[in-house]
Image (cartoon, helix red, strand yellow):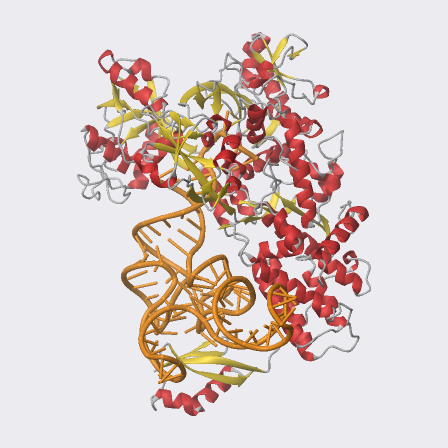
Amino acid sequence: MDYQFREIEQKWQKYWAEKQSFKAEIDPNKPKYYVLDMFPYPSGAGLHVGHPLGYIASDIFARYKRLKGYNVLHPMGYDSFGLPAEQYAIQTGQHPAATTETNINTYRRQLDQIGFSFDWSKEVRTSDPDYYKWTQWIFMQLFNAWYNKESDRAEPISTLIAKFEQSGSEGVVAVCDEDTLQFDAKAWAALPDNEQQEELLKYRLTYLKESTVNWCPALGTVLANDEVKDGFSERGGHPVEQKKMMQWSMRITAYAERLLKGLEQIDWPEPVKEMQRNWIGKSIGASVRFKVQNSDKQIEVFTTRVDTIFGVSYLVLAPEHEWVATLTTAAQKTEVEAYIAQTKKKSELDRMADTKTVSGAFTGSYAINPANNQLVPIWIADYVLAGYGTGAVMGVPSGDQRDWNFAQHFNLPIVQILDSQKDIDQQADATKEGRYINSGFIDGMNYAEAVKHLNQWLEDEGIGKAKVNYRMRDAIFGRQRYWGEPIPVYFKDNLPHLLKEEELPLVLPEIDKYLPTETGEPPLGRAEGWKYEDKYEYELSTMPGWAGSSWYWYRYMDAQNTQDFAASEAIAYWKDVDLYIGGSEHATGHLLYSRFWNKFLKDLGYVNEEEPFKKLINQGMIQGRSNFVYRVVDEDGRGTNKLVSFNLRKAYKTIALHVDVNIVENDVLDIEAFKKFRPEFVDAEFVLENGKYICGVEVEKMSKSKFNVVNPDVLIAQYGADTLRMYEMFLGPLEQSKPWNTNGIEGVFKFLRKVWRLFHNEANELVLSDAEPNKAELKALHKIIKKVQEDIERFSFNTSVSSFMIAVNELSELKCNKRAILQDFVVVLAPYAPHICEELWSLLGNQDLSTATYPEFKEEYLIEDEFAYPISVNGKMKMNLTISLNLDEAAVRSLVLSNEQVQSYLDGKEPKKIIFVKGKIINIVV
RNA sequence: GCCUAGAUGGUGGAACUGGUAGACACGCAGGACUUAAAAUCCUGUGCCCUCAACAGGCGUGCGGGUUCGAUUCCCGCUCUAGGUACCA
């Protein structure tokens, strides 16, 4: 064959590696440009066809920017801590570090094959102790910091201690726990050291707090929501319940307002910004305390509609609320306890998703509505979440549909409070219009007046105040897992203490197996003799997956540095990420945590920019086509050892389990392969249809955990990397999600062969000519230069592939072999198909593409002399009209109106209206 | 449930600012070249009616609306995908 892609691609990949063509050095004479990809988790399935989509786009952009004269930093690395490696370790006993290493090698081989222009000298791996040393170091900075609301930034904890020593807690305005003590300087000095430390922990940006987790007693471990399906563990099908646990948390809420404000100055897709805004969920309202009857307790609720306080018929506490037990009367005890037990089985997600069934239980106690001194019953219900607000809400049935449903269901009063509310015996009416009625001292006021008045009243009475609440909660930072960064903390007298900086990294200890201990402690509890100074217990939980990815873009700037996470000169030069490409599934996770850590590092002066990622592009997800098997479950919902084929599953109660698509062909399961894939089913009974086990199908995201991964290696072997690169771009808009589909790759392959043939004759000999290009050739060239430049700058890579195809067809038609044309064409195509373009560029007598610059297009070649356009009458297309360009509106008008054909359509009538668009007549209205 | 998107021929998609819907490619059908195959090239290809042509009708998930004109803007649905705090 003429176009030898294998030889060409190997040759140039080797050349780039040897010459270190893409190594980025600090160069103050050149403008910098930082193009970053969201680094992959190196899964055991290898790189799938979805990963390269974003990498190809960013690579095109990086190569384009180099051709435009920028000093481009384009690095790559691995987010190599994570749950799948740990689960694999549990199954096989292999150390996650070993499997991760293997997986990384596979990824690297696969990435190299695609011909990316990464600077591999700056590779990072989050699971490398030289890297996570700095993740631990940042954790220590967070521990040693507090958020001063006065300066509106994080400060070293020493400034807080200084304040305490000088004037006690007086005048300290901080983001902190709610149970901080009031003391003066003397009292502070008198506190024993451990009590001082306890108090400081309430201010630190990383701190210990009780939070709810999915606990699976049978596995003795905490599960991610992802691992829980319908109340049972995905692995093994065991029941899961909600349990409270002491956990490390990060005070991201301190940054809520800055995270919100910062969105205004970054060039991100509006939907992502919107998702972050909603996630942060700022709401302005008030907190109000309700006295409990015959008790000194006061229940604090947060409401965004304080104006509806006279319409309160009941209070609802989250079933986990700490006072539920004491508020429950003897008579209601059985009912309440049954309800709590039922709630424990539901995940938070289930609780939020299920709004159709109204449920709850009366505690037997009453609270006093401070506005009108009426008694209102106190209920518990699972639609109130312990983690949001105060874990208690006031029920106003006339103004809120969910409260209305609740009141209707439990026969609680529904009180109209605004004269404009309609049909409140049918449904709630959340209007803020009209004047208040049945509302005591706010009767007759409108919304704005009432809110103002009530907030003042709450303040005066000392029972509440206007308050801004954020939906966002502090981020839980501990994980009961092995394969993550150890938290650099040990416990002495029940208090956490940091390691010394020079003791970092705190390396993950070896353990015998990767399961929790028999007593339910995290896997690190198995590490024998793992003690600080041989006597103090280390923290046994590890950091979450997002820790290592919340600062990695700085490490790329100076990946080998042993003194700092990156040298300040490198940070000063590369500053921030100019273009960040990755999936929108990270919108509220990684992208928010990264902004949080960046702001924190900025506060402490370690970095220079307030926001880490200036421009963000979301590549759409390449979806997978997942296959499922159906496991029969018994009456208690326990998984049995029986699997039923897709079309027979309705006869049983089943749960769907993912099965590896690579052991399924045309939706028929390879049962022997399945037994190897899921050893726990080695003795399982398979209920077949027509002698086959048919799997269910669903389109969902391609990921190892869904076992639906398609590998790009096969495509590269068959068509080459340039074809794969262009095909992935050709598939559709970068931002759009789509299931993977290989049909059509032939067309792109044919295109590259046509490109090759522009340079070669039938005998595969070069046929270049030095003759002057003609007008038609210049037009074809400049059209593509302009189009591709516009496309790249608006990230519309799919349309440029089509345009390249048209351009090559035009040049082939013109039999164009002019050096002057082809030379520029190769440079324009190079970001997309770098290997073949390097080869052609060198055939043109150049060294390599680092010597090329992006050609400028000249508008003069693109101007057309004549233009045919349709003309319609009353919106219906009637005829094509050809005119010469550059006529002014009056000239066009006279031309058209004198035209016999148009006159005949007009039937001699005068036109009412002639519609021009860009100087063209589009429509004539008669 | 809530938040954020998406839906256009047999398929992937194009139409960038409301102005000829279906570019470009795949697939399919027919043809050329060839002993044959591969490769390459040419022609046709939204649907319906029609022997065919001319002409016509219908067409951008569904139902309405604005407009001379709507894939594009507005209102109301349906379905699909991502996120929903321990997957990454």
Is residue A61 something that shows in the picture? Answer: no
Where's residue A458, x and y in %?
34, 27
Using the image as rendered, state which of residue A373 and residue A261 is in the foreground.
Answer: A261
Residue found at x 60% / y 33%: A597
Is residue A16 something that shows in the picture? Answer: yes
- Above or below residue A133? Residue B49 is below
Q: Quadrant of residue A593?
A: top right
Where's residue A631, x and y in %?
39, 31
Using the image as rendered, state which of residue A753 and residue A399 is in the foreground.
Answer: A753
Where's residue A19, x and y in %?
81, 48
Q: Does residue A67 appear to the left or right of A286 in the view shown?
A: right
Where's residue A581, x and y in %?
59, 47
- The quadrant of the picture occupied by the C terminus of chain A is bottom left
Q: Quadrant of residue A126?
A: top right
Residue found at x 39% / y 23%: A239
Residue found at x 27% / y 23%: A379
- The quadrant of the picture occupied by the N terminus of chain A is bottom right
Using the image as rendered, state which of residue A661 and residue A182 is in the foreground.
Answer: A661
Residue found at x 45% / y 42%: A668
- Above or below residue A135? Residue A114 is below
How many numbered marks, from 0 up?
Answer: 0
- Above or below residue A787? Residue A617 is above
Q: Does residue A531 appear to the left or right of A208 in the view shown?
A: right
Using the image as rendered, state which of residue A561 and residue A633 is in the foreground.
Answer: A633
